[in-house]
Amino acid sequence: MFDPSSLTYDAAGLIPAIAQDAASGEVLMMAWMNADAVARTLETGRVTYWSRSRQAFWVKGERSGHVQALVEMRVDCDRDCLLVVVEQTGPACHTNRRSCFYTALRDGTEVEIMAPMA
Amino acid sequence: MFDPSSLTYDAAGLIPAIAQDAASGEVLMMAWMNADAVARTLETGRVTYWSRSRQAFWVKGERSGHVQALVEMRVDCDRDCLLVVVEQTGPACHTNRRSCFYTALRDGTEVEIMAPMA
């Protein structure tokens, strides 16, 4: 059985988790998990991060409704980064955009490539 | 003009950078950049990380030939994570697999979902 403690965490006990949309392949966001958040995500099927600012579990979409249903969790070769493939309800970003990566660098300047969702 | 110092770096001066294949949308790997690596990546069009283990610039593929040509760099809403959309030559992973995320958690066990490239 997979044991979350078998992953490599940083000095704060955290591992980065990249969320990717299962349908579109779009990279939605990156946030952090601790071992308990990894376990909760796997147990509940609801992607759960660790909020560094609030120092608390962050069940994605708990308040906004913009939940991430876990399709599959993947571990990288160094076991120090996670990829969570998700079904994203609504926008992933707190700015109401589908993805947090809505700013592109083009010709040396920042360009907004994604509008907030209606 | 975009200034790499406008990004938010961690206590070690680093920012995580997620590499995504421009053609397939596949998430290839996650590594770290410092402000100089961000600048070099943008200047050269060759994705350049900062190796935490070697404490040196890591021009991806410099030795292996498995280079990443930058298609576009994107910044997330918090300015503390980067997405580099790339044209990947050969495997991105040092295990010779296309992506570092070749281990999936399925039914509580680890499953290898990607074989090394020929």
Image (cartoon, coloured by chain):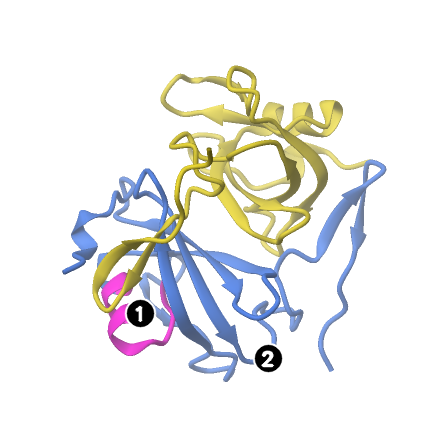
Chain colours: A blue, B yellow
Type of the residue with mark 1: Thr
Characterize the magenta stretch by its predominant secondary structure.
Answer: helix
Taking B78 as reference, is B88 above or below it? above
> Residue A90 in the image: x percent, y percent?
59, 79
Q: Which residue is more in the foreground, A27 or A77?
A: A77
Same chain for labels 1 and 2? Say yes or no: yes
Residue in view at x 36 percent, y 56 percent = A74
Label 2 crowd bin: few (<14), some (14–19), many (20+), radius 10 Å: some
Residues in magenta, as a range = A37-49
Judge by depth and name the residue closer to the eye, A78 or B67. B67
Return the residue nearer the eye: B10 or B48. Answer: B48
Q: In this view, does A40 lie above or below B21?
A: below
Say the numbered circle drawn on residue A30: none
Quadrant holding the C terminus of chain A: bottom right
What residue is at 62 percent from the left and 56 percent from the top? B77
Q: In this view, does B34 lie above or below A54?
A: above
Separation (CA) of disc 1 from disc 2: 19 Å
Across and down, in percent, residue B84 comes to 63, 42
The three-letter amino acid code for the residue at tag 2 is: Gly
Q: What element carries label 1?
A: helix
B9 left or right of B88 in image:
left
**Position of residue A52 in the picture relative to residue B5 (left or right):** left
Q: In which quarter of the image is the N terminus of chain A?
A: bottom left
What mark, if any, has residue A41 been given in the picture?
Answer: 1
Q: Mark 2 lies on which chain?
A: A
| Mark 1 crowdedness (10 Å alpha carbons): few <14, some 14-19, many ≥20 | many
Where is residue A72? Give x, y as percent. Answer: 38, 66
Q: Which residue is drawn at 42% across and 81% down?
A: A62
The residue identified by callout 2 is A90
Furthest-right residue in this view:
A107
Circle 2: element type: loop
Residue positioned 42% across, 34% down in the render: B11
